[in-house]
Amino acid sequence: MRNTYFCFLLVFSMFGLGTDTAHAQSAKKYSILIKGGHLIDPKNNIDGLNDVAIQDGKIALVAKNIEDKLAAQVVDATGLYVTPGLIDVHAHVFFGTEPDHYLSNGTVAVYPDPITLRSGVTTVVDAGGAGWKSFPTFKKNIIDNAVTRVLSFMNIVGEGMRGGEYEQTLDDMDAKKSAEVALQNKEYVVGFKLAHYKDADWTPVKRIVEAGTLAKMPVMIDFGGDTSHAPLSIEELFSKYLRPGDIYTHVFTELPVRDPIVDLKTRKLRPFVPEAQKRGIVFDVGFGGGSFNFGQALPAIKAGFYPDLLGTDLHSQSVLGAMKDQVNVMSIFLAMNMPLSKVVKAVTSEPAKVIQREELGNLSVGSVADVALLNLRSGKFGFKDIAGNRVESTKRLECEMTIRAGKVVYDLNARVSNLNKNQ
Ligand SMILES: [Zn+2]
């Protein structure tokens, strides 16, 4: 009898303790408070010290001083920049193990999370990996599994970016079918991609713009080319074919099969380029493994031309080359004297606008709590282009923490631990 009574008391007190702890947690107004950081939120014109409170996976409050005791977890962001979760508008994440499938369910693509979340990226747009035929596999294998939000510029080629002859097949570039499947998957498809077409023929461009017009979505153009003919004119592309809001990627490439934005003889920015940008043509870096040259970027930036988007062109080769990751690409543009506020805008609110997902890329109250904490380190750093040219800088951005939908998914220096929980 005595033993039973003792056990009852023990169970009761354990139950009571559990309830008190749970109560203390739920009594907190915020799950996470990011404290003392320098907030850059271009959409809301915020560039200064601010605290950010998160609750239920959403931004709950942005203010100069939010009390520690209101939050279950306080993240000390002193000395760090706090930005909306970064949006990489040009990535290749349709990873798979099919042989010879290149960037469409193949091994040249990468699974996003281990790279994106470590570099502050919470949203990626896969640039043409899937076409309308392969989109269901892409959704099932990647979109539905990744912690990173994965969106798609659907390839105008039905088979997607399988490489070789697949991308040269005009018969598989079906504007109507592409638009139809894009509209059926509007939650994930945000535009269309054309890539690597070799012939001097405008038909693929016409097809993709037709798909974009039918679905009311932007298109992204990656010109192909071939040494057997002169490259297609980008001036003609911008003035005759693309609509405001359409994207030209690999803007700083200097390949012999591409028409460059900076004249190769005078090293001056060609005047029709900033004019096209003024008319609404969008310029993406798309750094990749072979598409970024200082010989193009430095004169362009010196002339006041900044890219609208800092897409990485992430794939299994570019991550090991000069590109590395999103924060490295941002650091390269800082090294070329692009202001930090413009660099952050080109990976947050601007891509959100271009892909017509303006609920993303900002820290407005009520927005999803996708947040990046970035450390602008001082030291001696070097950056390469794809030709091996080097630029030095005293600054490098490093990702310190990534929060996705209110959960800490990457934490470089263990800023969040059980010891600093407010209970
Ligand atoms: Zn690409």
Image (cartoon, rainbow, N blue to C red):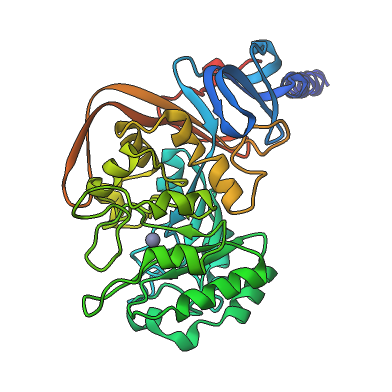
Quadrant where the image shows the C terminus: top right
Q: Quadrant of residue 364?
A: top right
Up/down of 415 relative to 252, above or below: above
The image shows residue 208 at horizontal and vertical percentages of 53, 73
Q: Residue at x 45, y 21 (%)?
A: 80
The image shows residue 400 at horizontal and vertical percentages of 43, 29
Of residues 272 and 18, which is closer to you in this image?
A: 272
The image shows residue 104 at horizontal and vertical percentages of 43, 70
Can residue 94 be seen here?
no
The image shows residue 146 at horizontal and vertical percentages of 53, 53
Q: Residue at x 57, y 51 (%)?
A: 354
Can residue 283 be seen here?
yes
Given the current orientation, which residue lies at the most extreme bottom position? Answer: 171
Q: Quadrant of residue 329?
A: top left
Up/down of 371 relative to 219, above or below: above
Number of numbered callouts drawn: 0
Up/down of 108 relative to 132, above or below: above
Q: Quadrant of ligand 1?
A: bottom left
Quadrant where the image shows the N terminus: top right
Of residues 149 and 288, which is closer to you in this image?
A: 288
Q: Residue at x 55, y 71 (%)?
A: 209
Q: Please state if 125 lies on the left or on the right of 400 as rendered.
A: right
